[in-house]
Image (cartoon, rainbow, N blue to C red):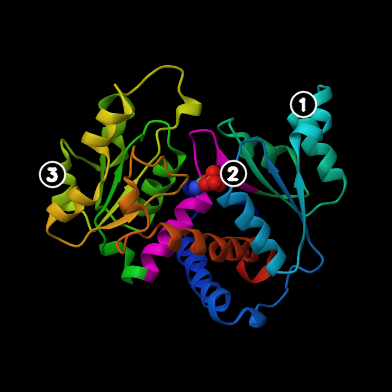
Amino acid sequence: MKHLLGIKDLSESEIFSILELGEIYINKLVSNRNSISQNLREKVIVNLFFEPSTRTRMSFEIASSLLGAKVINFSENVSSIQKGESRLDTLKTIEAMRVDAVVIRSSIPGLPYLLARDLKNVHIINAGDGSHEHPSQALLDALTLKLKFGDIRKINLSIVGDILFSRVARSNILLMKKINNNNVMVFGPTTLLPKEIEHFGVKIAKNFEEVIEFSDVIMLLRIQTERQNSAYVPSTREYKKFWGITEEKLKAANKEIFIMHPGPVNREVELSSDVIYCDKSLILDQVTSGVAIRMSILTHIFSSKYQN
Ligand code: CP
């Protein structure tokens, strides 16, 4: 695996190999940090985030550091982009500094693919490209599910909220399809479902009752206002009522349902405050899985053992 650009490029065996090593790393991370080998000691990894991030940027930084790599955090607002340099020229310049990998987040769908084509000597890791893909998020979500349930192929997963603008939804649906899990349901305001949703090969819920009846796990998504140019929902109050999860709705379900969310959460919109860290919430498990899965991704990219 030279790059991680999108889930769509991974084979089923690559996905399971990343998850398997992620599971080894999470055990080391939680209980035996001294046993982590610093296999990336001579590597230089640049975090290039053109969009805000807490979880993805920090967990790539922690993962790289635990594996012994040097990490450079690029700051756009003090870079020559402010003097008009293009992003491609910036990347060419960074490549010429002989760095080994670039972790990139950008609002431009497909940018990591263009860079992988133009930059021959550097590994590219997509940390989210517009509303296209967020592959490391889908892998960390799958690791979280594997740790909780064992066999992720048997889980009924609902993804609820802004599917239209969500790279997380896209990558999670692609991953579940790749591993032959056909038990994925989506639900959201019709304005926030892609027109071509029927071609995604997922079930489409008509109401929340269908979601509750179907799900072992509900993954809530934030309304991605930063990618929207008009109002897609009537109000946050109505959104919470029809598409949000509250303690009351969970109790009324009368079955065990776990909650996931990629973060950041808009409290009292897609999730009420009493649910975010309740005993059915896997949100902080997702964050911990994020460090382990990114260690696994970096190891897969740099180790000859994992090259095809
Ligand atoms: N889930 C996710 O991508 O979070 P950040 O934007 O904080 O990285």
Is residue 283 on the magenta stretch? no
Start-end of magenta stretch: 125-147
Amino acid found under the numbered disc labelled 2:
Ser
| Quarter of the image that includes the N terminus | bottom right
Image-based side of 64 in relation to 265, left or right: right
In this view of the protein, can residue 234 be seen by the observer?
yes
Q: Find disc 2 in the rendering and name its residue.
A: 53
Question: What is the spatial separation of the Cα atoms under label 1 and label 3, in whole angstroms?
Answer: 49 Å
Dot 1: what SS?
loop
Q: Is mark 2 within 8 Å of ligand 1?
A: yes
Q: Position of residue 225 (x, y in %)?
A: 45, 28
Dot 2: what SS?
loop
Amino acid found under the numbered disc labelled 3:
Glu
| Quarter of the image that includes the C terminus | bottom right
Q: Which of the pair 145/76 is nearer the observer?
A: 76
**Mark 3: few/some/many CA within 10 Å (<14, 14-19, 20+):** few
Q: Find disc 3 in the rendering and name its residue.
A: 209
Q: Is mark 3 within 8 Å of ligand 1?
A: no
Q: Residue furthest front?
A: 274
Which-is-in-front pick, marks 1 and 2? 2
Which is nearer the N-term, disc 1 or disc 3?
1
